[in-house]
Image (cartoon, rainbow, N blue to C red):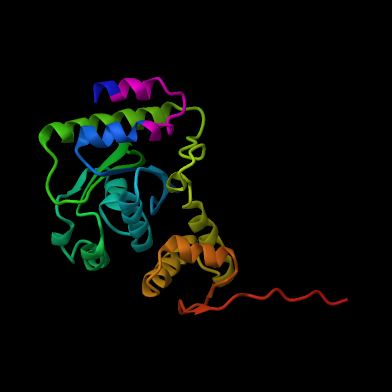
Amino acid sequence: MAAILGQLQARGDPGAISDIAVDVTGALGVDGLTVSLATGSDLTVTELLWCTDTTAREFEDLQLTLGEGPGPEAVRTGAMVWVPDLTLISTARWPALAVEAPALTARAVFCFPLAIGAIKVGVLSAVRRTPGPLTPAQADDALVLASALTARFLNSDEPPSGGLDQPDPLCDLQHAVVHQATGMLSAQLSLPLPQALLRLRAHAYSSGRSIIDTSKDVVGRRLRLDHRGNGEGPTTPVADKD
């Protein structure tokens, strides 16, 4: 981890760490990693900055769709949230995630907040395909990495570019479409943004789709939600009359 932190320090862009992600997963003894940044004052939506594989991405997308899970809780509370076995999570804590967890490839998730005091930046999430806790040494290394990432994000004059310069589409910043769709729903249904986001999440979950795919349909005008959360087909622009 000391060598990894040295490489991290040598990079100018705080988000340009996807090329050392393999070393990080090996040091932490996990299969996947994600870094998500908090957006908005209510911390209800995060922007996926980078991820290492489909398992980590699948779990991030599910949390975004449900609006619950260890990642959102870590961002909101500023405390570590560890789930050594996702099949044993309580329905009282995360009811929707408890239902979906058995079908996931991920079996254990460990979330470390990127925060200093009341300043909350985002979350570092480590995902395993097998259940089991982190060792004390792995946990210490993850905490050090989270602290280093937090400092770099807070001290950077430029917004992180994340994986935009990476050929891997898994690293693209795709959560922006959720913000677009939320804004469109807010205007169409005359709802505050938090309620519009809840409506979007509810429709995505009830239709068995991710919130990103649902948002793309809303932005592309292939889906329009009504006040009951029901979806209509593509919207057809009204032709101008002379």
Residue at image point 30% right, 52% down:
55
Q: Identify the residue at the far front of this view.
A: 167
Residue 235, percent across and down? Answer: 63, 75
Residue at image point 46% right, 38% down:
162
Q: In which quarter of the image is the N terminus?
A: top left
Residue at image point 35% right, 31% down:
20
**The quarter of the displayed image where residue 194 is located:** bottom left
Establish if 129 lies above or below 94: above
240 is within the stretch colored magenta:
no
**The quarter of the displayed image where residue 142 is located:** top left
Q: Identify the residue at the far right of this view.
A: 242
Closer to the camera in the image, 150 or 137: 137
Residue 40, percent across and down? Answer: 45, 48
- Asked whether residue 69 is in view, the answer is yes
Residue at image point 43% right, 63% down:
211
| Start-end of magenta stretch | 4-19
- Asked whether residue 142 is in view, the answer is no
Residue 188, percent across and down? Answer: 58, 70
